[in-house]
Amino acid sequence: MRVFKTMTRVILLVLSASAAMAVDAPTLRLDRQKATLVDSVRLEVSIAGTRQGDAAPIITGLEPFTVSRGGTASRVQIVNGQMDATVTHTFFLQPKQTGTFTIGPAQVEIDGRSLSSNRVTLTVTAPSPTTGKRRDPVFIESELSADNIFTAEQVFFTLKLHHRVHIGDLRLGLPTIDHITFKQLGQPRDYQTKIGGVDYGVVEIRYVLTAARAGVYSVGPARMSMTVRRRKRRSSLDGLFDSPLFGNPFSSRDDRHLTVVTQPPALTVRPLPIKDQPADFSGVVGRFEMQSTLTPNRLPAGESATLTVRVSGRGNVNRLPDIELPDTPFARVYGDQPVLETQDDANGSGGSKTMKWALVPNKAGRFTLPQLRLSYFDPTTERYQTLQTALHTLTVLPGTSQSAAAAPAPPGAAAKAPQGGKQQIEQLGRDILPIHMSADNLTVPFRSLSTGWFFWPALLGPPAIYVILLGGIRLRRQTPERRAQARSKRAYKSLVRACRGNTTECTALLETFRVYLNDRLNLSIGTLTPDEAQTILLAHGVTAATAQKAGAIIQQLETAAYAGQATAPAETAEDLLALAGILEKELR
């Protein structure tokens, strides 16, 4: 009964949390703001407050790109009865032209509501002049976002490992340089690029670099060690199974250790200027802003008001000083412990510092609080800047003697225990149940277990159950191959029924062809991209022309679906059927 009640409560909790969950507008994100024509850019559309992730969003502004889908991920979490659900759609963009493009908004329809996301901007440039000259299977590059900075100024240090072979066991060794610190920004990013017509995978790691002392530095070299997974060819079918999705059945592993080294770039660090340096400068470098509030600004004498000052921005926030509030003769001041918060993202390191004071006026009147100041150096303008709080006025009304006596204690002060002797122990109640002092009542009548009608079933039942389960497991192990063969035979008939059943939506046709390949080849493909389809078909004996035709049809459907064209041309389903007929003859 208790179990039933507990399950009922859990179900009601989930239903109530689901009903209270509000769907937020989708969020559009790019993994970078700048790319070249040979790069692949990752785009994500996240929808918070829903678990409905089947329908792909319609995204505007994708005409300058070739679009392929990366998959859908969902997350559900319940904390204190509140449900947090998020669905994320992933796409990969291949630029077709240079320029600055605005992508978005992404539109989704949830429960009859049409929701729109934000817009993002992507700048596409031509590849650098050196692109295309590298032919090494693995090489590493490093770059600095600026080579002439000030002391304590942030600069981005980026490492890019390019590879066109299988690698693993990556180990990175950063250079050790006196007065230089490295801080990694986020997780390494993995994407594809093209150099000299050759596809390369790229592992990109970004750091924010700061120098504590002026001078000229050589940033490097950085070393990256790895295992290169090579295969010894034992067949004339060279190049047939080079896809990272498949191993070569005609080869054996030949793993080798490799270390690549960067060419160290030069970095010039200038000291902070002495001229015009404020007297209260504490070494804060970056760009910051200050906000202040006084709540309330009108109160009776003896009650308290709170002054809050928050300094936020990007730079060395750990150098933000604890600002002191000058003495105020009209009120007692109790300072709270400052709170420092730091954060790192793609734009560098930053954060905020929040300081609070409780003001308890001791007389009536109208008083002006002193303005608080903070100085910092802005490396963008190469000048010192001074922030100050707004001009706050506190109006104190005449208060009663009781309110004056009830002035609050300083924040964080612990209440003291009353003076005097020890507190008496109070008896709350007595246990009316008898106390058992012997083990007589704990005995079990074991004799009854060895007699009666249930003795033999209890003795022989477990072995019989074990034999039945073992036979079922063996029988089950004999059936997957037969089930796979039947599944493969039904694949083409299922595709024909789907294509001739008035299926005209691009996403539906893509799903139909994905299901056909999974059933026909006994695979479990989650998301089918044009390149993956060609690789899979080539590995199963299909000619290159047929594989390219399959990739072209998938690419056509993906581009139409993700650019907002929901309905495919009438002849697309017939082309898909004709392609499947050819595949039935060529697949082995």
Image (spheres, helix red, strand yellow):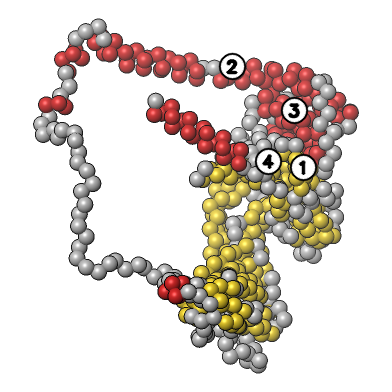
Q: Tag 1: residue type?
A: Ser
Which residue is situated farthest in the bottom direction here?
Answer: 275
The nearer-to-camera label among 3 and 1 is 1
Quadrant location of the N terminus? top left
In the image: residue 519, left or right of residue 578:
left
Q: Tag 4: residue type?
A: Gly
Crowding near the residue tagged with mark 4, few <14, some 14–19, many ≥20 C-alpha atoms within 10 Å: some
What's the distance in space between the residues labelled 4 and 1, CA to CA? 22 Å
Which residue is situated farthest in the right direction here?
Answer: 570
Residue 160 on image: x %, y %: 65, 60
User: Circle 4 sits on which residue?
Assistant: 71
User: Circle 1 sits on which residue?
Assistant: 114
Is residue 545 at all visible to an observer of this figure? no
Q: Is residue 264 above or below residue 53?
A: below
User: Circle 3 sits on which residue?
Assistant: 512
The residue positioned 68% from the left and 41% from the top of the image is 71
What's the distance in space between the residues labelled 3 and 4, CA to CA? 16 Å
Q: Tag 3: residue type?
A: Thr
The mark that comes first in sequence, 3 or 2, is: 2
Label for residue 482?
A: 2
What's the distance in space between the residues labelled 1 and 2, CA to CA? 47 Å
Crowding near the residue tagged with mark 2, few <14, some 14–19, many ≥20 C-alpha atoms within 10 Å: few
What's the distance in space between the residues labelled 3 and 2, CA to CA? 23 Å
Asked where in the image residue 53 lies, by quadrant, the reply is top right
- Secondary structure under badge 2? helix
Is residue 34 at all visible to an observer of this figure? yes
